[in-house]
Amino acid sequence: MKQITLLFTILFSTSCVSTKRFNQHIEKKHSISDLHQDIDMAYNQLKKNHPKLYQFVTKEKLDAKFDSLKQSITNPLTSFEFYKSLTPIIAEVRQGHISVSPPFKKQTKKEIKERKKSNFEFNKLDFEYVENAFLIKANYSKKNLEIIGSEVLSVNNEPIQQIIQQSKKRFASDGYNSTFHNRIIAHHFSGMYLKYKGIAIDSIRLQLKNKDSVYYKTFKRVLKEKHLKKDSTITPIKKVRLTPEQKLAHRKKQRFQKKYNKQHGYIKSKNLYQRNFNFIGKDSSIAYLKIRGFHNGNYKKFYENSFKKIDAKKAKTLIIDLRNNTGGRLSEIYKLYSYLTDQKFQFVNKAESLTRIPIFKAVATGNIPLSVKFFSYLFSPILITHDIFKSSKKEGHIYYRFSSSKTNSKPNPLNFKGKIYVLINGNSFSASSILSTNLHATKKAVFVGEETGGGYNGTVAGVYKSVLLPNSKIKFNFGLMQIESPYKSLQIGRGIIPDIEIVPTKNDRINNIDPELEWILNNETLTSTL
């Protein structure tokens, strides 16, 4: 017992020391030679593993950019100072799935434990950037609901426009698209702001404007309800003892809710669902699918149940809302598309890669937890065999096969044969853009909204290589597979262009108007009366 206690004491002490050393390391100035080494490593990793590195920038231009960065560093820099110099150069690659993060101070186990007892109120806010106005779109907290619709003027006394313009330099969309930048900054503002400042922040003061009134609101970390001290003056409510029948009914209700949450992809932090289905319109005859992302949950059952309801109601119009859907699983969009076509199809081409073992490279190399590395190497024979079986080489190129790259995929028997509208905006990215490309190219849908942030001609994603730069401790991730539909656009580096372009205004948002959806509903009403 004493030996075990001693072992834990040693491990704890080592952890504390390593945390302290790491924090000291990222705050110190790194030598010019160390920073040059990190630049070389970053570029070499991209050249070695990124399958479309020079798709939107020439090799000569990118070489010059990285050389220029090295020449510009004439003095030692801290990790965050270096991050601000490096990210605009990596953004020149113009691949939206490349993410770069500065190193943040590590916390001790005690600090992490205390932090888990609280929530940051600021993370409950959703924003939208329209007509150069940064608006609070939603507040998923039960408090401060009156701020919804207010315009953000500054964050911790720094003008919001300055933050936005500086942040835009540090990431890219797929190609030359511009709608992605404004949308994604608002969509992920909490995380973007942390990267912008380079430090973990527990208090944010917003200057807000509502009509002609300008005021300030501060958001802090607050204890979760279960950790709040109970008021001794309040008499606790006695628990009501349930009868066996009531307990059974309660368990049935819980099982139903769990199943429902899984199918719809419940987002606990926002009390929302990834997948939503209902009937809307004047006579509730229009089927409406609102898909916020293609991530968690049992999507197969969700789509099966939804299209059974559409078929039973004999709906003639379907709206698929992909606004602010930044992507997710290829398998899910493949399944969804099978309900939207009545022809055999090939959903995506075989993915192009620079390695025959992309999954093994993603899970067994780079900046990943040691536990993941251990199991990856333990099961490496299986992973490598699987990768090699799925990959092939042709004319000097390596291709990776998916189920969705089959050339004779069959439509689902419940496939929808009516009129389809697709709502898109700059946050329609990655998987949602691949789905949109297939629908657009085969002329199966009318697109309403603004150009997608994701490219028409595909994206580099699939599985990701994670890299930790040794000296600055900057992390960056990038995809290892070029995933694209069989269809191509002559407009290189652009997204799906809507048939009906409608961009919401500041006035629309303040008055809770959805102009894109309203246009479809009005158009359908007009069509049905003709």
Image (spheres, grey):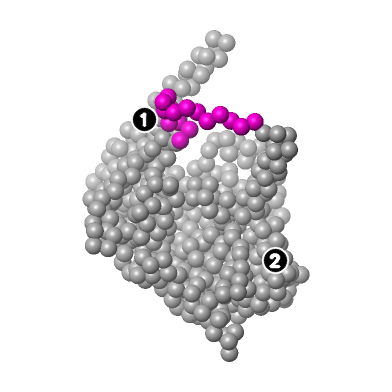
Who is closer to the viewer here, 179 or 66? 179
Q: Residue at x 24, y 53 (%)?
A: 215
Q: Is residue 450 left or right of residue 51?
A: left
Q: What's the residue type where badge 1 is placed?
A: Arg
Task: Find residue 244 and report its image quarter.
Answer: top right
Does residue 239 show up magenta in the picture? yes
Label number found at residue 182: none
Earlier-in-chain disc, 2 versus 1: 1
Who is closer to the viewer here, 133 or 251? 251
Q: Position of residue 91 (x, y in %)?
A: 39, 60
Label number found at residue 309: 2
Label 2: state its secondary structure: helix
Question: From the viewer's perspective, is residue 315 above or below residue 246?
Answer: below
Q: Which residues are magenta?
A: 225-241
Q: Residue at x 65, y 68 (%)?
A: 337
Q: Quadrant of the C terminus?
A: bottom right
Question: From the viewer's perspective, is residue 388 above or below residue 518?
Answer: above
Q: Residue at x 42, y 24 (%)?
A: 232
Task: Estimate the spatial distance between the alpha carbons at disc 2 and disc 1, rounded to whole Å.
Answer: 59 Å
Task: Find residue 483 and report its image quarter.
Answer: bottom right
Label number found at residue 21: 1
Q: Position of residue 277 (x, y in %)?
A: 61, 63
Q: Main secondary structure of the magenta part?
A: loop
Answer whether residue 199 is visible to the viewer in this image: no
Q: Is residue 349 left or right of residue 150?
A: right
**Residue most extreme to the bottom:** 530
Q: What's the residue type where badge 2 is placed?
A: Lys
